[in-house]
Image (spheres, helix red, strand yellow):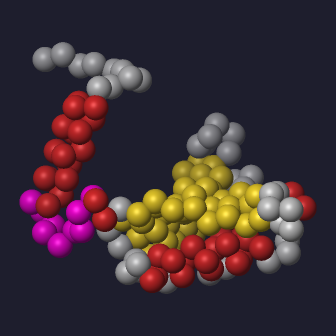
Amino acid sequence: MNIEITTTPNKQDTETISQGIINFNNSKTSDLEPIEKEIKFFVFVRNEFDKIIGGIRAVCFWNTMHIELLWLSEDCRGKGIGKKLIESAENFAKENGYEKVFVETTSWQAKPFYEKVGYSHIATLNGRPKGHASHYLTKNI
C-alpha cells in the first residue's frame, strides 16, 4: 500500500474517487439526483455605477442549497440588502426544487444575521479557526 498526498492531482485520480463516492451513495440511496444536476450560482448586488457591492456564492445539490459565502461592502450593511440577497438565492433554489439551505459562518461573521432571517443554529465547532468558532445553520425553504 502507498499513501500519497498531493496538491496537484491528475484529473483521472480525482474522477476515480468522485465516481467511487457517487457509486457508493447510489447503492445506499437510489433516489439521489445525479451529480450533473448540481447547480453553482452567484447572486450579485450592484450600485448605481454598476460596481459590485455584495453577493452570494452558492451550490445546490441533493435537496439543499449550500451558501458558500455572502459578502456585503461595509457601507451596505444594516440596510436590508443582505436580506434581499438571501431571499433572491432562496427563491432561485426553491424554483429549482431545493428544500433546505445550509450555511457555515464564523464567530466574527454573520450568525446573528442568519438567525434574524430565519435560520436555525444546529451546531458549533469551537476552536475553528483557532481562538474562534464555526457555526452551522439551516433553514427549510
Q: Quadrant of the N terminus?
A: top left
State the residue in front, 18 or 43. Answer: 43
Residue 32 covered by magenta stretch = yes
Asked whether residue 43 appears in the rendered view, the answer is yes
Report the predominant secondary structure element of the magenta stretch. Answer: loop
Residue 112 x %, y %? 72, 69
In the image, what residue occupies the spot 85% across and 75% down? Answer: 79
In the image, what residue occupies the spot 62% across and 40% down? Answer: 129
Q: Residue placed farthest to the left in the image?
A: 27
Q: Residue placed farthest to the right in the image?
A: 75
In the image, what residue occupies the spot 63% across and 74% down? Answer: 86
Is 8 located above or below residue 92 in the figure?
Answer: above
Is residue 111 rendered to the left or right of residue 140?
right
Asked whether residue 123 appears in the rendered view, the answer is no
Residue 41 x %, y %? 51, 62
Magenta-highlighted residues: 27-35
Q: Quadrant of residue 42?
A: bottom right
Residue 76 x %, y %? 85, 65
Is residue 101 rendered to the left or right of residue 12?
right
Is 64 located above or below residue 141 in the figure?
Answer: above
